[in-house]
Image (tube, coloured by chain):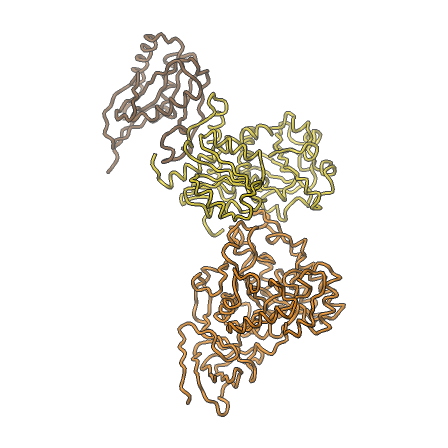
């Protein structure tokens, strides 16, 4: 299929491109920008006037719930939601059931995703066997099975000796280690330890539960020179620690979940279980510090931290509910809000959703260079939409953003040159070859 | 607007005579909050009753709880004497449907078993919905159902009759 | 706070009783005044009022508590309601059943009020959001969050002894961190305009930013007790030693136990309160618990009248809201 995306504002942060131009796609790859390549037989024109044309979004953390929790969601349902949200690459953490600690599980996920065909699903391998934090997982085999890294899967390794060895072993095979810092004992609470938790009588999770682990992990990384990524930071102190390590030259990166850029502990005041997340929503100053860290480049990616749930998982008293927000549907819209709020420019924001995460993963995607995989997101930034249950594509209805006015509507999502989502009023014309 | 004092004067005479006829030497008076207590206070003084005055708030005994709930201005009921075997005079300001008196009788019996209960009302406006009659009445008035009569007080005690606007 | 508090109707009347937070001075004094009229019922020959005749009240206890459940039961019975006790904590039949399923099942029994205790903060509010509109929910304690009927009986008891709230100095001593009683009491005292509220505890038993609730923090008991009018002692759970919050009961009593000598630092006519059940020799000395300053048993008596008041007020508003006929 040869396609041209016509008349859109092309933003490709990897190449510092921000201009109105036509984007030509052939055989699943970017063929050229601006002028049509020689002997280009056009099969399809996508009218992108007044729209932004950017690389497909890359989400560093999305739970698809398959295998193991198909009552919540499936690879098919969530990759479809991803496509509708302009996301072309999803990284699936290893805390599935069974855990992604052997090649068979990776292969199974890959096949399911390929069969569904809506988005690329990359598996993150487990750092330890069954994610128990005791024995090492077969990381070399996982790498061969195309895992993009190894991770604690949201269950931080408490034992420092095990973590140190896991880091060393991962480095042996040039694997990036993805960590979610939270001290298990200190983090055994329900809400940010602060005035809201005190008033509501919710057991608190102090900031030190996160920063204490980051500090330990950074010391190990410092000694070993291992490449590591910290996912879902929640506090300003965490950003400071990462910034200091980066300044020292440590090979560490970090991301933030988009809900931590918009919600605070105040959103818990009515015991709203939809705001029950781990790490917890913190104070206003933490939110501001996370936004500043994103703007300054300490945090190089925004992820959805997508955790779809069946209704029952959230229908209980706050502490009896499962944490997590269904985030694929709102990733782009909530991120664009940061531009409106003056946190970053539109190109910088798109960078945090595309080229930023691609670099963390060490992948040649997330950009629109000639020859790159044609993963493209086209969206109209001027159309506002209200988040409502019947417009959600994810099977998980658990979002606290219902009723929010979000900017931007995805009109087309292309995965390796194929249109995997088409929506909105933007007309698409399949043209006769000229 | 009518002054209630002369009605109470009439009631005092009637009640004194009735008690004498029945041979009740030491009655106890019980007023129903709020207007009934005002009337009872005056009767208590004029009759020179020895037993302290009792006061009933029948809010928790009303039969229309499920329609109007609890009156937020409810006050404690006080019967500062032993009810058992006592001759009681129950006093209210306006006798109408009889439901208030029904509730008051029920409450009295939760305190004990009186020897007898007489009923005195400042005004009997008719319209009874229960088989209850007063032994002593200050005045009989015939009012239509859209008319409302209210005793204001405690000083001076005045009866106000209002007609509900359609 | 964004949404209308769920426990009030559009006219601001109490439909449920979930938390003291957000209520007005008027709400509290209405409850206290109503309770005052109900207090005498216990002295009558017939200790019963017909007010809630024909209503069914379900005591839904997900946490074992004989004492609180009993006072709610007695309060309901004194108002002539029918009472059903369900101790979910000990009932194996409902294991694995979700709270909503339990709720729907009991709703199907045509009841009018749930009195609920649950180990999770916010459980009563969750219940109130999901019950059918004719049912009132009373919070008998949810996690660390609130125990509003206990707070009301506490302020009721205080008011009977010391009605001048603006000139009162009250000290709450002990495990504030885990205490729903303390949270609700602090709110109630603030709303009633109490002059000074103190909390006295080691830092391990104080929640972060507790001063945001409008209290003065003391780590030293003798200092905190100086010139107070009311001392409220909290119960210390034995498992706090295992949680590394305290070294031992002995040390706690040494530092924070209320003894006669320490009580002497308070005003001469100070009253001593405790929500019960008391741990003698852990948070309070027997000579104080049974001494002339103690109003602990009076609290129990008052608890029945206060709960009767709250039951009749909330159910009365439900009746008005639904407009059912007499």
- Viewer-nearest residue: A201 or C256: A201
The image quadrant that residue C50 belongs to is top left
- Viewer-nearest residue: C57 or A49: C57
Instruction: Answer left or right for A356 relative to B128.
Output: right
Instruction: Answer left or right for C63 relative to A413.
Output: right
Which chain is drawn using yellow? C
Q: Chain B's shade in the image?
A: brown
Image location of residue B131, percent across then percent down: 29, 22
Q: Residue A289, can we see it?
A: no
Residue at x 68% of width, y 28% of height = C286
Residue at x 48% of width, y 76% of height = A52
In this view, the residue farthest toward the bottom is: A39
Image location of residue C175, percent across then percent down: 65, 41
- Viewer-nearest residue: B42 or A413: A413
Image location of residue C66, percent across then percent down: 58, 34
- Viewer-nearest residue: B123 or A391: A391
Quarter of the rendering occupied by the C terminus of chain C:
top left
Say above or below: A414 vs A66. Answer: below
Q: Chain A's shade in the image?
A: orange
Q: Residue A66, can we see it?
A: yes
Q: How many numbered dots are placed on residues in this image?
A: 0
Say above or below: B128 vs A95. Answer: above
The image quadrant that residue A249 belongs to is bottom right
Image location of residue A357, percent across then percent down: 60, 72
Say above or below: C127 vs B83. Answer: below
């Amino acid at each position: 299929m040869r396609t041209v995306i016509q008349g859109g504002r092309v933003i490709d942060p990897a190449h510092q491109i921000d201009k109105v131009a036509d984007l030509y796609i052939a055989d699943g790859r970017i063929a050229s920008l601006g002028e049509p390549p020689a002997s280009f037989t056009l099969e399809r024109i996508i009218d992108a006037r007044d729209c932004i044309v950017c690389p497909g979004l890359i989400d560093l953390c999305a739970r698809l719930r398959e295998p193991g929790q198909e009552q919540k969601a499936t690879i098919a349902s969530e990759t479809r939601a991803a496509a509708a949200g302009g996301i072309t690459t999803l990284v699936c953490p290893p805390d599935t059931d069974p855990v992604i600690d052997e090649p068979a599980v990776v292969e199974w996920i890959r096949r399911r995703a390929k069969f569904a065909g809506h988005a690329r699903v990359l598996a993150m391998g487990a750092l330890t066997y069954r994610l128990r934090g005791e024995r090492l997982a077969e990381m070399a085999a996982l790498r061969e099975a195309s895992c993009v890294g190894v991770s604690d899967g949201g269950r931080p390794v408490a034992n420092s000796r095990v973590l140190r060895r896991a880091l060393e072993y991962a480095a042996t095979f040039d694997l990036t280690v993805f960590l979610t810092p939270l001290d298990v004992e200190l983090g055994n609470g329900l809400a940010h330890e602060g005035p809201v938790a005190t008033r509501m009588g919710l057991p608190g999770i102090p900031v030190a539960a996160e920063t204490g682990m980051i500090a330990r992990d950074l010391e190990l990384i410092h000694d070993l020179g291992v490449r590591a990524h910290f996912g879902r930071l929640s506090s300003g102190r965490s950003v400071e620690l990462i910034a200091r390590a980066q300044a020292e030259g440590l090979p560490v990166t970090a991301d933030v979940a988009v809900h931590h850029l918009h919600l605070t502990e105040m959103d818990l005041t009515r015991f709203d279980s939809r705001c029950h997340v781990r790490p917890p929503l913190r104070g206003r100053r933490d939110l501001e510090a996370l936004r500043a860290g994103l703007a300054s480049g300490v945090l190089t990616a925004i992820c959805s931290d997508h955790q779809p749930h069946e209704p029952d998982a959230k229908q209980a008293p706050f502490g009896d509910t499962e944490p997590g927000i269904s985030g694929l549907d709102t990733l782009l819209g909530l991120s664009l809000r940061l531009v409106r709020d003056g946190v970053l420019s539109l190109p910088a924001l798109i960078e945090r959703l595309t080229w930023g995460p691609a670099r963390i993963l060490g992948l040649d995607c997330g950009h629109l260079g000639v020859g790159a995989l044609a993963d493209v997101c086209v969206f109209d930034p001027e159309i506002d939409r209200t988040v409502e249950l019947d417009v959600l594509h994810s099977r998980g209805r658990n979002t606290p953003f219902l009723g929010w006015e979000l900017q931007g509507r995805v009109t087309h999502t292309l995965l390796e040159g194929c249109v995997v989502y088409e929506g909105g009023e933007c007309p698409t014309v399949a043209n006769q070859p000229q | 607007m009518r002054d209630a004092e002369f009605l109470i004067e009439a009631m005092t005479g009637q009640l004194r005579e009735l008690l004498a006829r029945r041979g009740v030497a030491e009655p106890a008076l019980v007023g129903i909050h709020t207007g009934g207590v005002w009337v009872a206070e005056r009767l208590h003084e004029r009759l020179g009753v020895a037993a302290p005055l009792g006061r009933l708030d029948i809010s928790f005994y009303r039969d229309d709880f499920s329609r109007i709930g609890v009156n937020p201005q409810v006050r404690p009921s006080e019967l500062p004497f032993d009810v058992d075997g006592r001759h009681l005079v129950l006093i209210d300001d306006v006798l109408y449907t009889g439901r208030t008196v029904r509730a008051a009788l029920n409450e009295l019996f939760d305190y004990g078993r009186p020897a007898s209960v007489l009923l005195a009302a400042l005004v009997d406006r008719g319209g009874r919905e229960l088989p209850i009659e007063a032994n002593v009445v200050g005045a009989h008035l015939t009012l239509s159902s859209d008319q409302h009569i209210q005793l204001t007080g405690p000083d001076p005690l005045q009866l106000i009759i209002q007609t509900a606007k359609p | 706070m964004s949404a209308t508090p769920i426990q009030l109707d559009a006219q601001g009347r109490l439909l449920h009783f979930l938390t003291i937070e957000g209520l007005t001075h008027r709400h509290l004094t209405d409850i206290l005044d109503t309770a005052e009229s109900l207090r005498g019922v216990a002295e009558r020959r017939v200790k019963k009022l017909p007010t809630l005749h024909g209503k069914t009240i379900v005591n839904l206890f997900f946490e074992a508590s004989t004492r609180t459940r009993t006072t709610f039961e007695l309060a309901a019975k004194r108002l002539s309601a029918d009472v059903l006790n369900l101790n979910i904590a000990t009932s194996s039949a409902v294991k694995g059943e979700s709270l909503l399923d339990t709720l729907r099942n009991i709703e199907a029994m045509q009841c009018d009020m749930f009195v609920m205790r649950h180990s999770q903060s916010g459980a009563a509010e969750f219940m109130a959001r999901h019950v059918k509109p004719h049912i009132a929910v009373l919070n008998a304690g949810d996690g660390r969050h609130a125990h509003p009927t206990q707070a009301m009986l506490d302020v009721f008891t205080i008011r009977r002894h010391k009605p001048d709230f603006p000139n009162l100095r009250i000290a709450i001593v002990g495990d504030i961190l885990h205490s729903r009683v303390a949270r609700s009491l602090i709110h109630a005292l603030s709303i009633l305009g109490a002059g000074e509220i103190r909390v006295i505890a080691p830092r391990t038993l104080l929640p972060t930013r507790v001063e945001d609730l409008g209290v003065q923090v003391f780590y030293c008991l003798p200092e905190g007790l100086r010139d107070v009018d009311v001392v409220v002692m909290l119960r210390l759970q034995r498992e706090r030693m295992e949680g590394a919050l305290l070294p031992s009961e002995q040390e706690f009593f040494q530092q924070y136990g209320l003894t006669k000598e320490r009580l002497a630092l308070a005003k001469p006519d100070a009253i001593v309160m405790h929500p019960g059940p008391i741990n003698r020799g852990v948070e309070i000395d027997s000579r104080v618990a049974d001494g002339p300053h103690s109003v602990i048993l009076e609290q129990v008596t008052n608890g029945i009248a206060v709960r009767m008041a709250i039951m009749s007020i909330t159910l009365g508003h439900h009746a008005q809201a639904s407009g059912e006929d007499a």
